[in-house]
Image: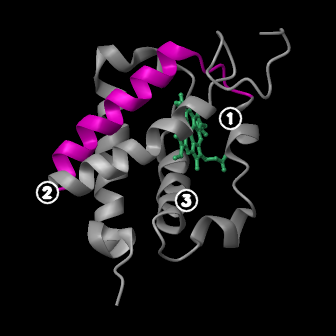
Amino acid sequence: MHETAYQRVGGEAAIRQLVARFYELMDELPEAYAARKIHSQDLGPASEKFVMFLSGWLGGPQLYVEKFGHPMLRRRHLPYPIGPQERDEWLLCMRLALDDTIADAELRGQLYAALLPIADHMMNRGGGSCSCHRTETA
Ligand code: HEM
């Protein structure tokens, strides 16, 4: 039977480790300060939501959708100013967290590659790569 990415990473326990490490790095790294600054003081609720989202995104239980409905990620990120700097810092934390918590290098690379375009899509400042929501004409 075809194994889901959720199974390959190691299920909910592994996702929890990844997310915990991700926000720990964001909290500690000076290089992630701009991304950290736009988050709430308490990273607990964001961590919980990210775990729930990744569970469904990786093909496991749709915990986020069941509780909050369609993710509409871009729309939910609009209150937070996200430009190239914040995107890069977010991706840095994610790359390091993947390195620290996912042993399989191929899987790690696949996950990072799949997250890249989503992170790009979250940009709402500073000329993101997404042209569909830009007000200025290209
Ligand atoms: C591009 C860089 C990104 C930045 C700077 C960013 C920043 C944020 C911030 C500030 C929040 C609110 C957290 C709070 O309550 O304090 C948030 C929520 C969230 N982010 Fe991101 N994010 C980024 C990319 C992503 C990506 C790529 C994903 C998914 C793959 C994602 C998934 C989520 C989810 C699921 C939530 C919770 C949404 C909700 O229900 O309110 N984010 N993010």
Residue 66 occupies quadrant:
bottom right
Q: Which residue is mark 3?
A: 53
In terms of secondary structure, where does tag 3 sit?
helix
Direction from residue 137 to residue 22 in the image, left or right: left
Q: Are marks 1 and 2 in contact (CB under 8 Å)?
A: no
Above or below, 120 against 111 in this view is: above
Above or below, 36 against 55 in this view is: above
Residue 19 disc label: none
Above or below, 113 against 59 in this view is: above
Alpha-carbon span between mark 3 and mark 2:
21 Å
Q: Is residue 46 magenta?
A: no
In terms of secondary structure, where does tag 2 sit?
loop
Q: Is ligand 1 within 8 Å of the beta carbon of the residue shown at mark 3? A: yes
Kind of residue at disc 3: Phe
Sequence-wise, the earlier of marks 3 and 1 is 3
In terms of secondary structure, where does tag 1 sit?
helix
Q: Locate residue 56, reporting x and y percent.
A: 53, 68
Q: Is ligand 1 within 8 Å of the beta carbon of the residue shown at mark 1? A: yes
Ligand 1's image quarter is top right
Q: Which residue is mark 1?
A: 77
What residue lies at 29% left-to-right and 36% top-to-bottom? 95
Residue 24 occupies quadrant:
top left
Quadrant of image for the C terminus: top right
What residue lies at 62% left-to-right and 64% top-to-bottom? 64
